[in-house]
Image: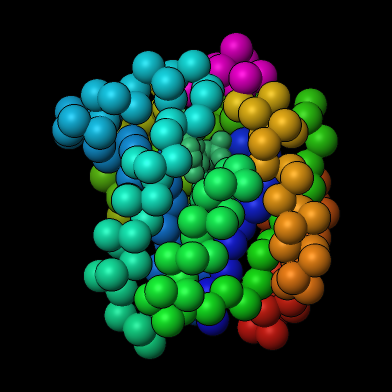
Amino acid sequence: MNLIMLGPPGAGKGTQAQRLTQTLNMVQLSTGDMLREAMANETEIGKQAKPIYDRGELVSDEIIVDLISERLDTLDRDQGFILDGVPRNAAQADAVDKMLSEKGLTLDFVIELDVDDDQLVARVTGRYTCAKCGTGYHDTFQKPAVDGVCDTCGGTEFKRRSDDNEDALRARLAVYHEKTAPLRAYYGDKGILHKIDGMAAVEAVSGALDDILGAS
Ligand code: AP5
């Protein structure tokens, strides 16, 4: 089973994708994570992407398509994958379709998480992750069981993203509404789009997602 998580910044795409890696043994292919890794390692792609990323704009389609294509080639065919953060515009949607068909892969579900813009600001500005294993948390909505200790790996160091400030978020939201949201119609026409109320609590969103995937 292969799927796309669609939704604005902070909608919960990564939270749900990360959960599915554990509950359904799926592989999360997050273009944001790939770019953050490239920036941390100061690779050529990372250096090129950094200023664009920090402004909350989209990096070039060419970079994204290459990143995804390389990762798809390394996948175990028995494992399903989750495209998290891609496609983000019509050109990327076309490229993903073409790439999947060339590689003999199919797309089963596109999951749209619907969340109001004001709620997204609260979510993104409170987000942090474990520096060791990447598990995601939130100052208010998703705290670790023991304050300051990662539930997954016991790590005690956490980090915040350079684009998780209000200015960059407003830019990311504008890009989402202009370029990514129209993809709803594209996948709706293919009959594989499923919308979930992303304003609900994490557990409720997880339940709705599992119902759609037939995993409950
Ligand atoms: P990317 O890393 O993909 O970020 P994004 O799409 O802006 O999405 P986020 O990661 O911010 O949010 P999310 O939906 O995963 O939410 P999360 O689960 O963390 O992209 C970053 C940048 O990289 C882009 O701006 C662009 O520059 C570049 N880029 C990436 N892909 C690209 C592409 N394809 N093309 C071009 N450029 C690209 O949740 C957020 C917080 O809310 C967390 O703290 C979480 O704990 C909490 N939370 C989650 N669900 C709930 C809930 N139901 N209730 C309450 N709190 C919740």
Task: Give above or below for 99 relative to 76.
Answer: above
- Residue lying at the far top in this picture: please name it: 167
Task: Tell me if residue 166 is in the magenta stretch.
Answer: yes
Task: Give above or below for 166 relative to 184.
Answer: above
Quadrant of the snapshot with the C terminus = bottom right
- Residue 71 horizontal/vertical position (percent): 30, 61
* Residue depicted at x 74% and y 58%: 186
* Residue depicted at x 44% and y 41%: 61
| Direction from residue 17 to residue 48 in the image, left or right | left
Q: Is residue 15 visible?
A: no
Which region is colored magenta?
A: 163-171
* Residue depicted at x 25% and y 33%: 45
Quadrant of the snapshot with the N terminus = bottom right
- Between 175 and 173, which is closer to the camera in this rendering? 175
| Direction from residue 44 to residue 214 in the image, left or right | right
Q: Quadrant of residue 3?
A: bottom right
- Residue 53 horizontal/vertical position (percent): 43, 25
